[in-house]
Image (tube, grey):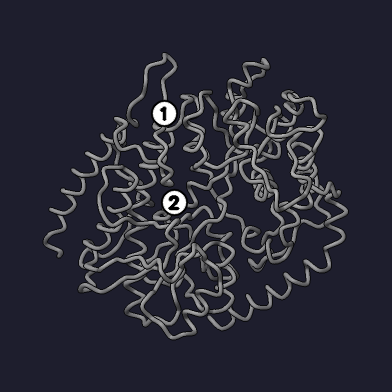
Amino acid sequence: MKQRKSVCLLLALLMLTAAFLAACSGDGGKDPVSSGNSGTAVTDPSGTPVTSAPAPETEPPDPDTVHDLPADLDFDGASFKMASTENWSCLRNDYSGEIVNDTKYEVKCYAQDLLNVDVEENFEIMAGNSVGSNIVLNYVLSGETEVQVFNMLDRDAAANTLEEIFLPISRMRYVDLSKKYWGSQAAEKLSFGDYQFLALDSFQLNSLNRAGCIFMNLTVAENYNLEVPYDLVADGKWTLDVLKQYDGAVQHDVDGDGKLTHEDVTTFGYADSRQLLLNVMSGANVPFIEKDEDNLPICTCFGNEKLINVMEFTQKLFFNPATSVSVDGDEKNLMYTQDMFIHDRQLFLVAQLRDIVYSAEMDSVFAVFPYPKYDEAQENYVARAVDAIFPMVINSIDAETADMVGAVLEAMSAYAYQYLFPAVVETSLQFRYNNDPRSTEFIKLVYDSRTIELSDMLVWDIFGDTPTFRLMYQGTAPATWLASIQSKAENILDDYIDDIRYLVKNLK
């Protein structure tokens, strides 16, 4: 198989080029998350359609994006198997002529040919699109060893880690977590004590597709004579206070029934109300949970005036029934406002990068911006990756198999960072589906500022879904709510810390 590597890669390059041309010409246009939307090509400021991404960089690749696997590494046809849900599949099994699909397939082909392994994904174990902790725990307890890697949703990955059924990925031979393709910018947030169990890989698209951003409908902005804050965003001056200045600028009770519904017009909306508060908090860099001096989780929300300000800000702008569409706290009637944005009845939509694709066929042009900063003193914009998926390695495998698993993960993540992510960001999001030329740089900015917060993995068990849903709709004062649950939340977190300390102690 080693002898065929150069030929296979040449064929792969030719087919990838053909797929790229087909996608850019509009013949193969599937979106990055397989919605089937045909998309709209972006135009430059003169109105000329842009039909392809810019030419590739001619400079040598950044060493932090290239793996350092030994050239003679060969695993003699060994089997590498992952368990995944079908919706979150990171690989494909054949060419289709669509660039994202075909590049996913190339990720698999590259690792197979480079390392002489047979890469396979199993969806039956995760049947029903469930990635719950019990599925993996029961599989391990059953003594099965066919699958070596489970692709886990963040909060389930954290729970399984504490069950001692996964290897610390920082201990795996051949995996270099200092590389960009492992989300090195988020490494500290994904570790407990001295050990990193979780790492953002590049062959699964969740951390990219689900990276948070905010859209602005330019037709609505023009109709109401509102400024589009391109320059403020570019200059790092896009803050919560700037966003707040738009409060009430767009509001119209169309049917005159005295309450705002999806048929009316509002300033602010969201694609997912459950994640909205955490999204805004993350953009403002004020999570519920941070790390102490021992790199262990600690609640930093109690008595935190900055955090309370962000919670009150979010509640007022997005959950006030007098100025926004409300579901009256009824979880069963959870409603989304994305349809309002698409039909020019909303100015701003808190969304994710994948929503660029879902909104691509709307008649109006929309700008894509990062989440606002807390203030101008905040160094960087932050794009929270919602429900990221992590490759978790079963700790019951032998050392030789663990070496093979580490090498395959390293190869796939490095290759995907150089080819799959650009296929999604540059070819698909920036140019095929984006209809606002000035947003091209901001889509890249969101991509570059992706991160994952520890609070995403622990907040559900410690705080429940109250801070992300009921609290906002009930109109409860955030400071009052925080004071009422402080003792309970700290006790739950103490139990987590005890489990983490026990786990880390056993690894010494």
Whichever of callouts 1 and 2 sits on the residue coming sooner in the sequence is 1
> Does residue 69 sit above or below 24 in this rendering?
below
Decide: is 433 above or below 423: above
Is disc 2 surrounded by few (<14), some (14 to 19) or many (20+) residues within 10 Å? many
Q: Position of residue 447 (x, y in %)?
A: 49, 42
Hey, which quadrant is residue 238 in on the image? top right
Q: Is residue 137 visible?
A: yes
Of 194 and 103, which appears nearest the observer? 103
Q: Is residue 402 above or below residue 413?
A: below
Where residue 335 sits, quadrant-wise, is top right
Badge 1, how many Cα within 10 Å: few under 14, some, many 20+?
many
Residue 248: where, in percent of width, then height? 77, 26
Badge nearest the viewer, 1 or 2: 1
Give the total number of marks visible in the rendering.
2
Q: What residue does disc 1 label?
A: 40
Which quarter of the rendered picture does the C terminus lie within?
bottom right
Q: Which residue is mark 2?
A: 205
**In the drawing, what numbered circle is on residue 372?**
none
Q: CA distance from mark 1 to mark 2?
A: 21 Å
Q: Position of residue 169 (x, y in %)?
A: 46, 69
Amino acid type of disc 2? Answer: Leu
Q: What residue is at 88 percent from the left and 54 percent from the top?
A: 480
Residue plotted at (33% across, 48% down): 101
Q: Of helix, strand and loop, which one carries label 1? A: loop
Q: Amino acid at mark 1?
A: Thr
Q: Is residue 81 above or below residue 309?
A: below
In the image, residue 373 lies at what x, y percent? 66, 38
